[in-house]
Amino acid sequence: MQTLTVGLAERSYPIHVGGGLSGDSKLLAAATSARDVLLISNTVVAPLYAERVRNALAGRNVVEAILPDGEQHKSLGTAEKVFDVLIANRFGRDAAVLALGGGVVGDLAGFVAACYQRGIDFIQVPTTLLADVDSSVGGKTAVNHPAAKNMIGAFHQPKAVVIDTDLLRTLPDREIQAGIAEIIKYGLICDVGFLEWLEKNMTKMLARDPAALEQAILRSCQIKADIVARDEREHGDRALLNLGHTFGHAIEAATRYVGWLHGEAVGAGLLIATDMSHRMGMLAAGDVSRVKALLNAAGLRTEPPRIGAAAALDFMRIDKKVQSGRIRLVLLKRLGAACMLADYPDQILSETLTAHFGA
């Protein structure tokens, strides 16, 4: 096991990475002393791993809330059903929530924990590569609105993140690829050396080589932990973690969160952001080709749905990074160096969207 720390003063917490950790009772005991624990999972993950976690929580009152699988269920309606479970079981402010699942489960569980009795403890036990390196770390919790992703939420840091790399063994290939999109993002925004490492080790990662996956998870989590420690509530550097996301969220909203995994949409968004950076003169054409080659090597989709530039722009306008009616975009000054811009030429954005989403 290796442990990183998200440094947030009295709210600092550990990120544990290693095999077999989801069944480690000592780690879970160190995270919270709560007697009452709501275990939130979904219909895919719970049959595989819920018993392991329940056994690690032996001696506590563990109640389960098992959700349907899929991004379309990350909603206020689903959250209300989870609140019903907490209230029906008379859980108090000294209870805790444990999220066992991917990004949908983790985001929704964190949102419920943030809201219930104005905030109770929660622990992240992510089960997908994407959740390992992104949504489980940093305390962003949310549910989706039908018109926009993650529009309703709160910042609520977990007490611990327990990343059990053994859980990746049962993950479908497509989910591994989706997680790799977020890992590529970290190299693009601030570590070109990591980007080069990914180019050399992509075959190993797709083959689920344990050492390669653990190294990628650790480096990704370290980058995110450092950024969150500097800017917890996204007033500055943390916004750079959204590279590819504004474009990707448009893809997800346009398809009603069906047909595209979040990481797949982000992967396509990374290429769109890279292309726009090139159109603005910040990147060479070869940089765009290099990013596309890496995304292709990961088996990721790079062609978004042809919904048209105008429709894509409408979805992008419903975004948390919009200020004073202006869409702020994360772009690349160079590979390994991201920036936030609001003063880009509208014509270049229009040309970029037309090239990728159609006229």
Image (cartoon, helix red, strand yellow):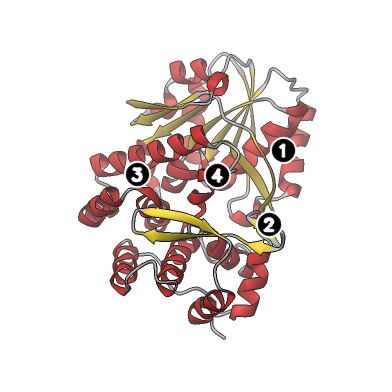
> Which residue is at 58% across, 62% downward?
342
Along the line of sight, the residue nearer the viewer: 355 or 74: 355
Asked if the residue under mark 1 is in contact with the one under mark 4, i.e. CB atoms within 8 Å, the reply is no
* Residue 89 sits in quarter: top right
Asked if the residue under mark 3 is in contact with the one under mark 4, i.e. CB atoms within 8 Å, the reply is no
* Residue 96 sits in quarter: top right
- Looking at the picture, how far across and down is residue 297, in whole percent? 29, 64
Q: CA distance from mark 3 to mark 1?
A: 29 Å
The residue mark sitting in front, 1 or 2, is: 2
Type of amino acid under label 4? Gly
Quadrant location of the N terminus? top left
SS category of the residue bearing label 2 = strand
SS category of the residue bearing label 4 = loop
Q: Indicate which disc residue 82 carries.
A: 1
The residue mark sitting in front, 2 or 3, is: 2
Q: CA distance from mark 2 to mark 3?
A: 42 Å
Q: Indicate which disc residue 236 carries.
A: 4
Q: CA distance from mark 2 to mark 4?
A: 14 Å
SS category of the residue bearing label 1 = helix
Type of amino acid under label 2? Gln
Q: Indicate which disc residue 323 carries.
A: 2
Along the line of sight, the residue nearer the viewer: 184 or 68: 184
Mark 4 or mark 3: whose residue is earlier in sequence = 3
Mark 2 or mark 4: whose residue is earlier in sequence = 4
